[in-house]
Image (spheres, rainbow, N blue to C red):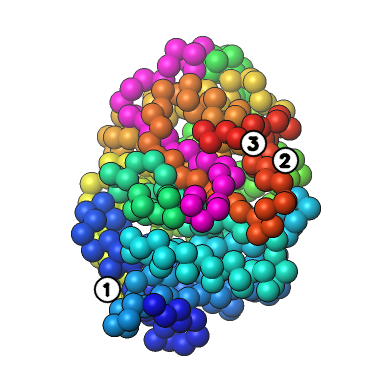
């Protein structure tokens, strides 16, 4: 087997093509958009390079020259300091069912990160934000993935665990049938805040993109900014987020709660894009865009993807979360456009949010796992800290 570094257009194309071999007979597989992956490794479009980030990619070929695997290693300057030891990342791993081949790819990442001064690596993760390409699928290999979420064969799990990776945290993805009414506990809790005449909940139909960005910014910063390690969001960031959603957003499922004119909570969902991207075969070129826009406009929608849910800290415990969920059942379901919802992954380090989601009557739909390993076995391994400062059992896998 031969390990080849990606350093030209031909090898970059081959890197993108490797999954075609791995998933050739998998009916559930929907490829990531090649354009999404290309921009991750483009120094002109990924700002992490300007901040000092580094990356390297490899493809693995068999003796006949056929590509049988790929992987990337990287150093994210925003996350390299994890605890007291610098940790790099590996991701975009694909490989045939061959342990020797898999370990060759992992060795390449390990050796490169050691040479760069790293003491450990997380994987499989993204060279960027956690909202895409993050974690290894470890439960539910029988349904199609959501847009941006990793999907892989079951045999990847022993590859990672036998190599020495340990469970850093689990990423839990929940599903809910929208026809099932909100549970009584949510109705009661919603009543606490709904009795206030100043309180309201509504979708964003008729609202300008600038107003939506302003509402989003205010709730985000009140809910997370400067808290639990989250930095405050800047107005230009909020505008960029809403602008990026312009083509795909359905304003009826961008749900905000208000106290008077002040936004105090949101439940942000988008259509499940893989219902449309499955028609473009992983390539959003000109023809792919035409097919995507056609299906986005004319194909029936079944699933909405909940991407973020938050309430201003001063209104925690007032029933706002319940009112947002109740509104979805009262106002969105009767529109008939969506049958169910998938809630984007929630880390097992966030017990408060998991409790809210589980009380909603959801079903655990799939689980992904973010793994970590230290190169020196003498470095103690600890799982991801629990939000709120609670202690997590380092031996827990669930």
Q: Nearer the viewer, residue 375 or 365?
A: 375
Q: Are marks 3 and 2 in contact (CB under 8 Å)?
A: no
Precedes in sequence: disc 3 or disc 1: 1
Q: Residue at 68% of width from left, 35% of height from top?
A: 387
**Of the two numbered discs 3 and 2 in the rendering, the one whose residue sits closer to the viewer:** 3
Q: Quick one: label 1, few (<14), some, or many (20+) residues within 10 Å?
A: few
User: Label 2 belongs to which residue?
Assistant: 228
Q: CA distance from mark 3 to mark 1?
A: 49 Å
Identify the secondary structure beneath mark 1: helix
User: Label 1 belongs to which residue?
Assistant: 287
User: Label 3 belongs to which residue?
Assistant: 394
Identify the secondary structure beneath mark 3: loop
From the image, which quarter does the N terminus lie in? Answer: bottom left
Q: Nearer the viewer, residue 364 or 47?
A: 364
Q: Position of residue 47 (x, y in %)?
A: 63, 70
Q: Is residue 4 above or below residue 335?
A: below
Hey, which quadrant is residue 42 in on the image? bottom right
Residue stretch in magenta = 160-188
Q: Is residue 255 left or right of residue 305?
A: right
**Of the two numbered discs 1 and 2 in the rendering, the one whose residue sits closer to the viewer:** 2
Q: CA distance from mark 3 to mark 2?
A: 20 Å
Question: Which residue occupies the extreme right position in the image?
Answer: 84
Precedes in sequence: disc 1 or disc 2: 2
Q: Quick one: label 3, few (<14), some, or many (20+) residues within 10 Å?
A: some
Q: Position of residue 325 (x, y in %)?
A: 47, 27
Q: Is residue 69 above or below residue 351?
A: below
């Amino acid at each position: 087997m031969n390990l080849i570094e990606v350093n030209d257009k031909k090898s970059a194309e081959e890197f993108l093509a490797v999954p075609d071999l791995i998933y050739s007979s998998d009916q559930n597989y929907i490829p990531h958009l090649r354009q999404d992956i290309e921009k991750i490794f483009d120094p002109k479009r990924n700002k992490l390079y300007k901040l000092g980030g580094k990356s390297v990619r490899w493809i693995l070929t068999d003796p006949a020259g056929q590509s049988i695997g790929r992987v990337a290693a990287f150093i994210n300057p925003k996350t390299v300091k994890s605890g007291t030891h610098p940790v790099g990342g590996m991701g975009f791993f694909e490989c045939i069912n061959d342990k020797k081949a898999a370990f060759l790819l992992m060795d390449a990442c390990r050796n490169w990160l050691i040479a760069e001064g790293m003491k450990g690596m997380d994987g499989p993760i993204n060279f960027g934000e956690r909202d895409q390409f993050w974690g290894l699928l470890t439960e539910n290999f029988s349904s199609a993935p959501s847009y941006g979420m990793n999907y892989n064969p079951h045999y990847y799990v022993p590859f990672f665990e036998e190599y020495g990776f340990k469970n850093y945290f689990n990423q839990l993805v929940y599903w809910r049938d929208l026809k099932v009414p909100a549970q009584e506990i949510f109705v009661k809790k919603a009543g606490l805040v709904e009795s206030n005449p100043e309180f309201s909940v509504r979708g964003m139909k008729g609202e300008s993109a600038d107003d939506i960005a302003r509402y989003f910014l205010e709730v985000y910063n009140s809910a997370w900014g400067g808290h639990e390690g989250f930095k405050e969001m800047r107005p230009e960031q909020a505008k960029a987020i809403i602008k990026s959603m312009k083509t795909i957003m359905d304003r009826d499922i961008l749900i905000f709660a208000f106290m008077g004119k002040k936004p105090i909570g949101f439940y942000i969902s988008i259509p499940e894009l893989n219902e449309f991207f499955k028609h473009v075969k992983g390539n959003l070129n000109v023809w792919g865009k035409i097919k995507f826009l056609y299906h986005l406009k004319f194909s029936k929608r079944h699933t909405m993807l909940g991407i973020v849910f938050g309430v201003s800290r001063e209104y925690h415990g007032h029933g706002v979360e319940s009112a947002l969920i109740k509104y979805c059942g009262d106002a969105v379901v009767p529109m008939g456009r969506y049958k169910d919802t998938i809630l984007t992954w929630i880390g097992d380090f966030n017990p408060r949010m998991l409790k809210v989601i589980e009380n909603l009557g959801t079903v655990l739909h799939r689980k992904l796992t973010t793994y970590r390993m230290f190169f020196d076995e003498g470095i103690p391994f600890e799982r991801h800290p629990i939000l709120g400062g609670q202690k997590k059992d380092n031996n827990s896998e669930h």
